[in-house]
Image (cartoon, helix red, strand yellow):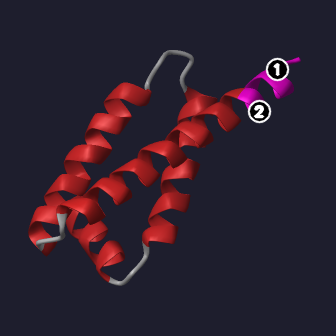
Amino acid sequence: MLSSWVVMVVGEGGMTSLTIISALLGAWLGLTFRVFILVPAAILALATLAGSGAANEAGAVWMIVLDTSIIAAMQAGYIGGSALFVAVAD
């Protein structure tokens, strides 16, 4: 189901919304988990995006750009969520 949702969003030119969603997901992960959770989350995101790219028959360059932006946004959100957790905890 998630893969079809990603196909729908990316198919409509929603790379910005997908990046924002991944940043918010990263912030949630940073606020929720105290362990390094980005590796499993990144693997899951890459697998989902690879499936949606194969379904859309997207080009390799486009998928690399999309994967890079999603992972970077997730990492930035994780750092922001972790910083927010530390600031609020004090």
The crowd level at tag 2 (other Cα within 10 Å; few <14, some 14-19, many 20+) is: some
Q: Is residue 44 left or right of residue 57?
A: right
Q: Main secondary structure of the magenta part?
A: helix
Q: Specify the quadrant that holds the N terminus.
A: bottom left
Measured along the vertical axis of the image, is residue 49 above or below residue 37?
Answer: below
Can you tell which quarter of the image residue 37 is in?
top left
Tag shown at residue 60 = none
For the point 10% across and 69% down, the residue is 55
Name the residue at the bottom extreme: 12
Tell me the amino acid under the disc marked 1. Answer: Ala
Marks 2 and 1, how far apart at CA: 8 Å
For the point 33% across and 73% down, the residue is 10
Tag shown at residue 84 = 2
Tag shown at residue 89 = 1
Q: What stretch is highlighted in magenta?
A: 83-90
For label 1, the SS is helix
Tell which of 41 and 76 is nearer to you. 76
Tell me the amino acid under the disc marked 2. Answer: Leu
Q: Specify the quadrant that holds the C terminus.
A: top right
Q: Could you tell me residue 42's position as x and y percent?
A: 35, 37
